[in-house]
Amino acid sequence: MNKMSSKLPPRYYEMPPRFRECFYLANASFFDSVNWYVHKAYEIIFSELVDKLMSFSGLDEQQASNKISNIIKVLDQCNSLLDIRYPLKKEDGSLELIRSFTVNHGALLGNTLSLGGLRISPHITRDEMKGLSVLSTHRLSALGIRATGAFGGLKINSNEYSPEEMKSIIKNISA
């Protein structure tokens, strides 16, 4: 936070500097672009969140604002990112190294269940999986589902594998 933001009124939310210009940058990462939209939404709804928290918690305006700001800080990063490589024995007897990613977001909210999806593409990145897990957390929240976001990815071209090999690959990443 800069010096000016410490003097802002309690009902005002300021987007972190890291995300401020992401919308306008052609080379912004997917994760940062997703967070630009998330923080833009926080800016719009922050005052209403403070009012709602004050109405049922008995906190004053500053305490409610601080509590919501702390929750936003917790949600700002992914909880875990696994970048795993493991060997696959193909049907022709050769070995190939398979790379996969698993990302969890929002686990500090206290929900133990994680929901999301699986993307299979030779072009996926860790950053893309982080962005998709953030979107998954907020999508589930908007639907009223008490679960956190998660996303997995296989960095392979699925057309290069037989159905049995694909079953083996997917079984290995789910275990």
Image (cartoon, rainbow, N blue to C red):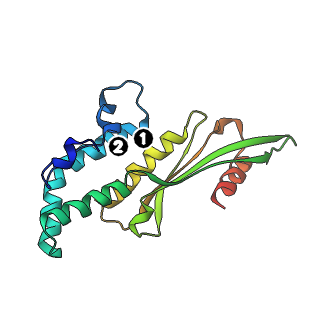
The image position of residue 175, as x and y in percent, is 66, 62
Residue 136, visible in the rendered structure: yes
Q: Quadrant of residue 137?
A: bottom left
Name the secondary structure under disc 1.
helix
Name the secondary structure under disc 2.
helix
Q: Which residue is nearer to you in this view: 96 or 80?
A: 80
The image position of residue 43, as x and y in percent, is 20, 47
The image position of residue 26, as x and y in percent, is 38, 24
Residue at x 64% of width, y 36% of height: 157
Label 1 to label 2: alpha-carbon separation: 6 Å
Kind of residue indicated by mark 1: Phe
Against 91, residue 62 (above or below) is below
- CB within 8 Å, label 1 to label 2: yes
In the current view of this chain or complex, which residue is farthest to the front?
Answer: 3
The image position of residue 49, as x and y in percent, is 18, 60
Q: Which residue is nearer to you in this view: 8 or 38?
A: 8
In the current view of this chain or complex, which residue is farthest to the right?
Answer: 93
Where is mark 1, residue-wise? 31
Q: Which residue is nearer to you in this view: 129 or 165?
A: 129
Residue at x 42% of width, y 61% of height: 148
Residue at x 17% of width, y 68% of height: 53
Q: Which residue is nearer to you in this view: 156 or 39?
A: 39
Residue 13, visible in the rendered structure: no
Q: In the picture provided, is 93 more to the left or to the right than 106?
A: right
Where is mark 2, residue-wise? 35
Q: In the picture provided, is 113 more to the left or to the right than 15?
A: right
Q: In the picture provided, is 149 more to the left or to the right than 16?
A: right
Q: Quadrant of residue 96?
A: top right
Kind of residue indicated by mark 2: Asn
Q: Quadrant of residue 2?
A: top left
Residue at x 19% of width, y 65% of height: 64
